[in-house]
Image (cartoon, helix red, strand yellow):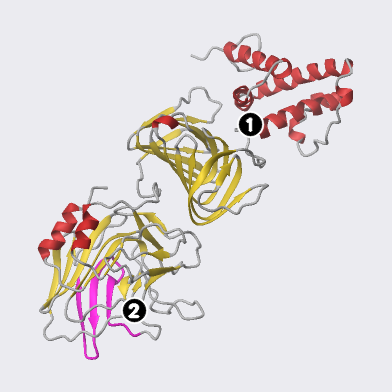
Amino acid sequence: MRQTSTLGGNGMTKQEENELESLLMELTEGDFSSEQSHRLVELMKQSPEAKQQYLEYCQMHTMLAWEHGVLGEHQLPDLSSTPELLSSSFRIWKPLAMAAALVLAGLVLWSPWGTSSKMKPGEPVASLTRSVAASLELFGASSDFVNGSAVRTGSYQLDEGLVQITFESGVEVVIEAPASFEIHSPEFMILNEGRLAANVPPEGIGFTVETPDAEVVDYGTEFAIEVVGERSSEVHVFKGEVEVRPKEQDPLINPVRLVTNQATRINHSSFIPLGISVDDQRFLRSLDEPDPSYSGSVRELLPLAYYRMAVIDDGQTLKDASKGQKHTASVVKGVKRRQPFAPGRIGSSLRLDGPRRGGYAQISPSLELPTREFTIMAWIRTKTFPRDAVLVSDMSLSGDETFRLGLVGDHGHLGFTLVNEERSLQIVDSSPLPLEDWTHVAVVKASESLQLYRDGVLVSSEPMDGFQARAHKPFSIGGTPKKSDGRRRYQRSGFWHGRIDELAFFESALTSEQIEHLFNITPSN
């Protein structure tokens, strides 16, 4: 049970009263460290009585200083912008209460716990190791950031893109826009809003990230945080251990220990930790693309083009990872300007936001599939099922289309359609795709049949029956091209809502054994 003082009657424990008294003495008579400032503001946030005692102490100390002529040398600024700090009981001592309020305001604004003002830029404590189409601003300083730029203490705003910051201790953080954050030291930063993923080596144990709702202390781990304005903070641990300390006056709310594959949410309205499922598909934790056996096996089959959806610094290029590497694709962003990369089945993926945003990617016109045999293969993930959403299509600006791989109808059934001057040929999976899960898909045009595979298994097939395919080019990924004025195609706005990864085009018909093998060797999530 929490023991409170019967003498003070202020809701603080006796130990907290003694601690407060010691801190106040150090504030006025000794060297006051940043840790002591942090603790003093914490006590005042937890207890209004502690703030009252602080003001009374400052009043008394200021009276003595004034009496002995010390304050006569100082000019007190106008604190009219902070009337809440001036208790009516001190108005007869207005100059003294103003001095006390000034000290309090200075502590709150200088302390890492205060976020109501912008920090002034300070000393370099980290470096910018990656910048992906980023619009990064450091308050009060020039903001011309490039890879390798020094990152100083201060207040930052990231309006677009991604940044990877490496601290002196080796701690790496990836921050995704939109985000607002402050860097106070190599071991401490504040995330006011946005997403952050951290990788902490043994040398960085103790690295701390504060949010409006909690303080997250690392014990050597890989974790991520998302802050949604004044609503909530979430902490997800992918490896290792962290301690989450809610910012709440109630002493019965203890810190939360999270270990591998655990997560918690702290709502701003209650500060009570809520256990949730860890989400390894929300946070882009690394900007480097791994090279597992899957990608090596795909290259051994000599694809015409292979888009691994690796993160590229310009935020719009999809690099061709095939042997020739000549069929680059470019992301055509929709109305939302966030960067297009997200966690993928392997490394990163292309993220598309559906008909409302209208984003897609356009492949170089140099890529042309043969009409006799070909294979298209990818890992895909759906968030919703937009009507007739496109995975890959060769629709032109005039509306001419010879083939389409994508959803058929409204309920998540994947299909492939070939069209010539006389007729069309279509295969459709009878089972809908799962939402929010990865699926391996492949469509094969052989000389005698058209085949659709899902997770390594043949799910639909139709004989060609003499069907003569037309030449296919150029290609779009995740949507259909826009007119020159930027407007979406009316009645053809089949934009993918979800993610696409490891997209490969082959000039041969892969066998069922090859497709099954590639599905089986994909590393687990």
Tag of residue 111:
1
What residue do we see at 27% from left, 82% from top?
Answer: 402
Secondary element at tag 1: loop
What residue do we see at 65% from left, 17% from top?
Answer: 23
* Image location (x, y in percent) of residue 122: 64, 39
CA gap, disc 1 and disc 2: 57 Å
Residue 410 part of the magenta-drawn span: yes
**Residue 32 relative to residue 300: left or right:** right
Residue 181 part of the magenta-drawn span: no
Relative to the observer, which residue lies in front, 109 or 389? 109
Q: Which residue is mark 2?
A: 474
Tell me the magenta residue range: 400-428
Amino acid residing under circle 1? Ser
**Residue 472 relative to residue 427: left or right:** right
Our reading of the magenta stretch's main secondary structure is: strand
Secondary element at tag 2: loop
